[in-house]
Amino acid sequence: MKLYLLTALLALTSLAAAQTDAPATTDPVPAQTTPAQPAPATPANPATTAPATPASDTAAPEADPTTVVASVGGTDYTLAEFDRSFRMAVARSANAQGMPYSADMEAGFAQYRPQFLDTFARQQAVLQLAEKGQYTSDDAAIDTQLTADRGQFQSDEEFTAALQGSGFADETDYRLSLQEQQITSAYLKALSARFKFSDAVVAGFYSLNKASFTRQAQACVKHILVPTEAEATQIVKDLAAGGDFATIAKEKSKDPGSAVQGGDLGCLAPGDTVPEFDKASFEGPLNQVQTVKSQFGYHVLVVTKRTDAGVAPLSEVAPQIRDQLAADAAQKYVDAQIKRLNLTVYADRLPAAPTPAPTDDTAPADSAPAPTDAAPSDTAPSDTAPMDAAPTDAPPAP
């Protein structure tokens, strides 16, 4: 909800840890595609991005989807498999800016396809490592999630449209993504858990990186969004009579992003939400029901916690530091294993990128941020982070 009080239901999460120092080997044949450009520091405004229209009326030859574009650990991956991953990465970028995915968006990101090919190869490498470690998906849990997701829509057609707006071809494609996510997440989580750090190491990291723990004031909020004042009044009465906030939110809230979380919006910074909601979050009473009207409707909200701005104390962030150090150590281990898999990418085999044509009232298409499936960590990795910890039960090299 951060910038908008309405959020998308579906979002693809990361399949691989952030790219570090284990690049894939590039085939020596010169690439025929546009060289990758670094992503701009500030994401482009989607409203000002040029529509993806070819520069020429001459249609390019259709690419062969069976073309091998990457090889990882002796396994070949085709253009069709890469295109699927790239499509979902573009959708992730679009959804993050409050827009549903559409196929014509891909032209605006096409210059990043060679760059993303490295990311794709690393994703497959991590998935291979996870599968070699005998990690599997929980199909029953996936069935439960699919049922819950489908239940948010009045028809199968609406559900399919939502899936396609998040970059998935259909429900089968979505299921496959959930399975891949479960497998790699379980592998990386288990690996991180094997790295342990002493209190002294954690305190040392905190001292060297205090600036990373400077925070804005925050308010942790949950809400139920309804279109009319009468509905909001009834919900307040139901809560006063002992109704469960999360249950009511799941049943009645019109904010699909938070409804599935029982109305929980997480912790917000000043200015993250519209002024009326912001005022209630930071000036209203704690742990009491409030009703606020905004441009989105009526919000029945409860502020569960507030924190002041400043440097968070060590006692509060120590678990976060341990997680960060373990993740960094696990990433170094994964990078070493990926190098042994012998990644090779064939950027020259990717179809030539179309050139979007900017118009007078739009920005050039190259202002679009590079799509990525690398999820940012809560604390930026530091070169000073101590790496003297070793996994307590290091997994054997595959």
Image: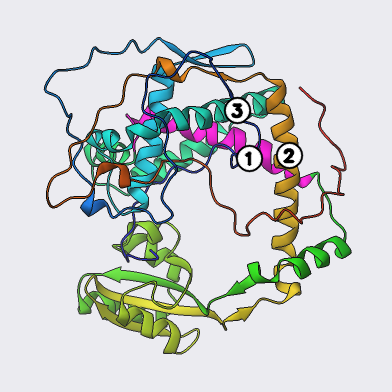
Which label sits on residue 127?
3
In magenta segment, residue 361: no
- The reply, left or right, for residue 66 in relation to residue 199 is left
* 220 lies above or below 21: below
- The reply, left or right, for residue 151 in relation to residue 24 is left
Q: Nearer the viewer, mark 3 or mark 1?
A: 1
Quarter of the figure with the N terminus: bottom left
State the image coordinates of residue 44 (x, y, percent, origin top left). Answer: 32, 53
* 225 lies above or below 346: below
Dots 2 and 1: beta carbons under 8 Å?
A: yes
Counting the numbered discs, the total is: 3
Dots 3 and 1: beta carbons under 8 Å?
A: no
Decide which of tag 3 and tag 2 comes sooner along the chain.
3
Q: Which residues are magenta?
A: 167-193
* 277 lies above or below 130: below
Principal secondary structure, stretch drawn in magenta? helix
